[in-house]
Amino acid sequence: MFSRFVLPALAGLVLASGGLRSEEVRDSLKPGTPELKSAGALAFGPQGILFVADPQAATIYALDTGDTKPGSKDMPKVASINEKIASLIGAEAKAVKIGDLAVNPISGNSYLSVAGPKAGALILRVDRGGQISELKLAGIRFAKITLPNATDKQRTESVTAMEYNKGRLYVAGLSNEDFASTLRSIPFPFTEADKGAGIQIFHGAHGKLETASPVRTFTLYDIKGETNLLAAYTCTPLVKIPVTQLKPGEKVKGTTVAELGNRNKPLDMIAYTKGGKDYLLLANSARGVMKITTEGIDTQTPITARPQGEKAGQTYETVASLKGVEQMSKLDDGHAVILARTEAGALNLETIELP
């Protein structure tokens, strides 16, 4: 079956935009010490390069992790990882804040963006055997780019989600523009960031057009040969946006293809194939984990009025076995690594079979 998922460029491949080879990509990184004020969204690019968003500084770093070889076949599992991280950084477990989870597609190692009251912002690596270590930033090879018009009022939302594909880093967040909800398509290696495209959507649960609500999570997905960004917003519209429309200064209207239920915040999303069909897996704050079909998404009637019920458009089923999921990232075609919180408050890193 032809895969419609958009995958990152792997080691040794020519990047689709600009024809740069992996050696040239790594040569664009220079040794130094990034000074993270915060650590939020994560995304992997080619050659084990990890993109780290620092929303407080409205800056994105590209870090050379050196993690470029396949790892073991172990399925990662760490019980009460928040407590283990707290012990590592000298903090209480309740004070450990994990911003994001990303699995390196080359090695299968998991990376976490973490903040603690004493350690500040840092990046941790969890290998496939469950061992936790800090990615040392002193002397690391890196590059950075600063977003020129990031929001001043809601700084922590200057970057809310990122994904890399074919030489470009797609970045969601808020700006100071009239259409505050902004999507950027940033070439990598970095040169400079433009002002991005302002995004307007119809929010069915609210019954109106909106431009100020940021994308909470997204994934890239090909529809009839055209790469689209499938984005989830708070309360909970699902919107498709062709990436060809993400041009600097453009005002883009996304197509709302589903209303998934209000009073809810989407947390993380991945796309995968199961039984020859494509699905989205969406973790939520109040509505569990949704398995959303992509069947017919290319012909789905856009939602342009308040639905009769709280749900409309693309259908989904709730995966009852997955509870408390806060973050997830694909490990391979059949598995994902998740961070799930128990009723007692422990945060477990686990490997699941994709449902």
Image (spheres, rainbow, N blue to C red):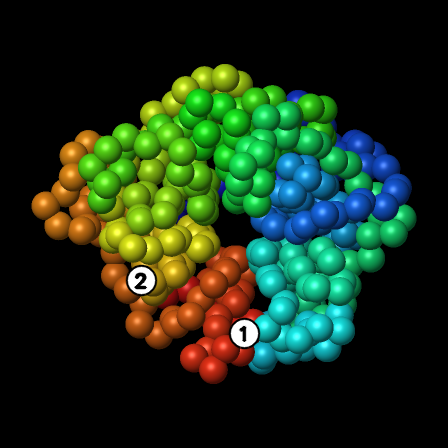
* Kind of residue sitting beneath label 2: Arg
Residue 335: x percent and y percent?
49, 64
* Kind of residue sitting beneath label 1: Leu
Q: Earlier in the sequence, mark 1 or mark 2?
A: 2
Residue 86: x percent and y percent?
69, 74
Check the image and name the residue furthest to the top.
249
- Residue drawn at point x = 74 percent, y = 48 percent: 36
- Mark 1 highlights which residue? 347
Please count the marks in the image: 2
Mark seen at residue 151: none
Check the image and name the residue furthest to the left.
308
Q: Quadrant of residue 188?
A: top right
Note whether residue 281 is visible: no
In the image, residue 97 sits, relative to residue 178, either above or below, namely below
Judged left or right of residue 334, residue 236 is: left
Residue 216: x percent and y percent?
44, 46
Q: Secondary structure at mark 2?
A: loop
Quarter placement of the C terminus: bottom left
Along the line of sight, which residue is nearer the eye, 226 or 137? 137
- Mark 2 highlights which residue? 287
Judged left or right of residue 296, residue 36 is: right
Along the line of sight, which residue is nearer the eye, 318 or 353? 318
